[in-house]
Image (cartoon, grey):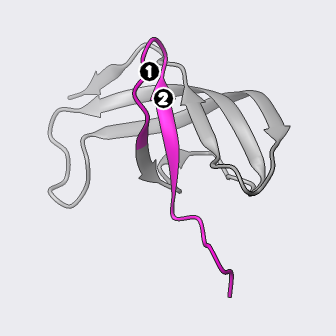
Amino acid sequence: MEKNPITGVQIREERSSVLRTVGLYTIKGFTYKKGNEYELLVKKTTLANPPQDSGNVRYELISIVSQRKISLKRTSKLSLPQCSPQSSR
């Protein structure tokens, strides 16, 4: 078993300095590889009527803008540029 399993990733939306942690499998179509830092282009959808057992925001991968190897002693971050959020109705 891994000593320090990764259970979430830090994201920062475009034009924001605030980092927040989301679940590792929050971005549909994206698979995180340990030891890498990514910049992603994603589609952000805010659900009007989300299920009660989950959040109201969904992310879907459009493309990986950049990926680079990092030291495993450092925290990995994902930068998520906001891509025309659309509300589901």
Q: Amino acid at mark 2?
A: Arg
Give the mark toward the camera: 1 or 2.
1
- 15 relative to 26, above or below: above
- Using the image, determine if residue 72 lies above or below residue 59: below
Relative horizontal placement of residue 36, taking residue 20 as reference (left or right): right
Q: Secondary structure at mark 2?
A: strand
In the image, taking residue 86 as reference, residue 54 lies left or right, namely left
- At 38% from the left and 39% from the top, the residue drawn is 58
Which quadrant is home to the C terminus? top left
Q: Which residues are magenta?
A: 1-20
What is the residue that sits farthest to the front in this orientation? Answer: 73
Question: Residue 20, percent across and down?
Answer: 40, 40
The secondary element bearing badge 1 is classed as loop
Task: Name the amino acid type tagged 1.
Answer: Ser
Q: Quadrant of residue 33?
A: bottom right
- The residue tagged 2 is 12
Residue at the image position 58 percent from the left and 65 percent from the top:
6
Q: Position of residue 52 (x, y in %)?
A: 14, 56
> Which of the 4 image quarters holds residue 78?
top right
Of residues 70 and 8, the one nearer the viewer is 70
Residue visible at 58% across and 29% down in the picture: 79
Which percent across, then down, holds residue 66? 77, 27
| First reached walking from the N terminus: tag 1 or tag 2 | 2
Determine the main secondary structure of the stretch shown in magenta. loop
Q: Nearer the viewer, residue 89 or 64?
A: 64
Crowd tier of the residue under label 2, counting other residues whose Cα lies within 10 Å: few below 14, some 14–19, many 20 or above: some
Specify few, some or many for label 1: CA neighbours under 10 Å numbering under 14, 14-19, or 20 or more: few
Question: What label does residue 17 carry, if any?
Answer: 1
Q: CA distance from mark 1 to mark 2?
A: 7 Å
Q: Which mark is residue 26?
A: none
Question: Is residue 54 highlighted in magenta?
Answer: no
The answer to whether marks 1 and 2 mark residues whose Cβ atoms lie closer than 8 Å is yes
